[in-house]
Amino acid sequence: MTEKPGIVVTGASGRMGQMLVRTVASSDRARLVGAVERAGHDWIGQDVGTAMGGAPLGVTVTDDLLEAIARAHAVIDFTAPAATVEFAGLAAQARCVHVIGTTGMTDDDLAAVRAAARHATIVRAGNMSLGVNLLVQLTRQVAAALDEDYDIEVIEAHHNQKVDAPSGTALMLGEAAAEARGVSLASVADRGRDGITGKRERGHIGFHAIRGGDIVGEHDVLFAATGERITLRHVASDRSVFARGALKAALWGQGRKPGEYDMLDVLGLKD
């Protein structure tokens, strides 16, 4: 490809959407060619740069993804599950790389995404940062090395506007730990303990969600046994780490065969 890949950002007015717009617009490896918002949003028809309170970027916000991706090579999507499922179908029709950072998706949502991946390249991850994906790998290795004498707890913290819990990243970490122990996460996950719950089940993986202020993202994986504890931790202090990872995924996906990939593929960390 001789020209820089054109990128469309969905949910352009959101916290991540605005960060993605800035990241793509300032990149020397990609072009911002589209910004999408839901029908009826105040930004529709405005230049996205102006709507964000800055200089014009030459891209008008639209509610028509199909029109926006007609001139795009990739869509970066941090929106909501229902919107992401719709976008996956449209991106597949356009044979456009679809980078999905949306969390809180149901099994039915994921099945729809997998169906779209038969026709298009999809990169989906609960977290796009390099550090978090290294943490996932470390969690897998430590869980494989330690037996069930070590209880596993995943503790995550995010800002007070986040609508899903546990976070997508927490679930990635739990999945890595469960996989390393040869069990399904669904069969061993403990969430939201409250009241007289009884003693902790051996081999279970606990999840705890903290919501407050403007916390960008903090994740701890605790391995606790009698006499010692091991804690693996990642702290994100700026959303730009997610935006940079998402752009990296969009560029990596160019020319790839249709299928569903994740950030471990992008970063070359797959076993």
Image: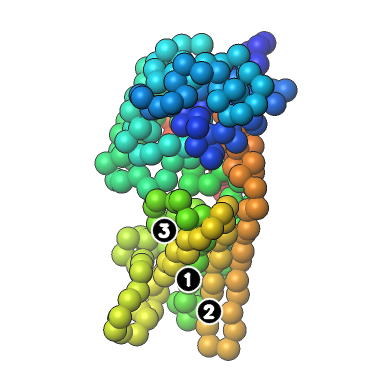
**Contact, CB < 8 Å: mark 1 with mark 3?**
no
Q: Amino acid at mark 1?
A: Glu
How many other residues sit within 10 Å of disc 2, few (<14), some (14-19) or many (≥20)?
some
List x then y, in percent, for residue 28. 72, 23
List x then y, in percent, for residue 149. 47, 81
Q: Residue 224 got which mark?
A: 2
- The answer to which quarter of the image holds residue 165 is bottom left
How many other residues sit within 10 Å of disc 3, few (<14), some (14-19) or many (≥20)?
many
How many other residues sit within 10 Å of disc 1, few (<14), some (14-19) or many (≥20)?
many
Q: Amino acid at mark 3?
A: Pro
Question: Measuring 51% from the left and 18% from the top, which residue is drawn there?
Answer: 46
Question: Measuring 54% from the left and 39% from the top, which residue is drawn there?
Answer: 16
Element at label 3: loop
- The answer to which quarter of the image holds residue 135 is bottom right
Q: Nearer the viewer, mark 2 or mark 3?
A: 3
The residue under label 1 is: 153
Q: Nearer the viewer, mark 1 or mark 3?
A: 3
Compared across the picture, whether 245 is left or right of 76 comes to right
Question: Measuring 32% from the left and 60% from the top, which residue is drawn there?
Answer: 186
Q: Nearer the viewer, residue 245 or 53?
A: 53
Check the picture and name the quadrant holding the N terminus. Answer: top right
Element at label 1: strand
**Contact, CB < 8 Å: mark 2 with mark 1?**
yes
Observer able to see residue 187: yes
Question: Measuring 35% from the left and 44% from the top, which residue is drawn there?
Answer: 105
The residue under label 3 is: 166
Compared across the picture, whether 83 is left or right of 156 comes to left
Of mark 2 and mark 3, the one earlier in the sequence is: 3
Q: CA distance from mark 2 to mark 1?
A: 8 Å
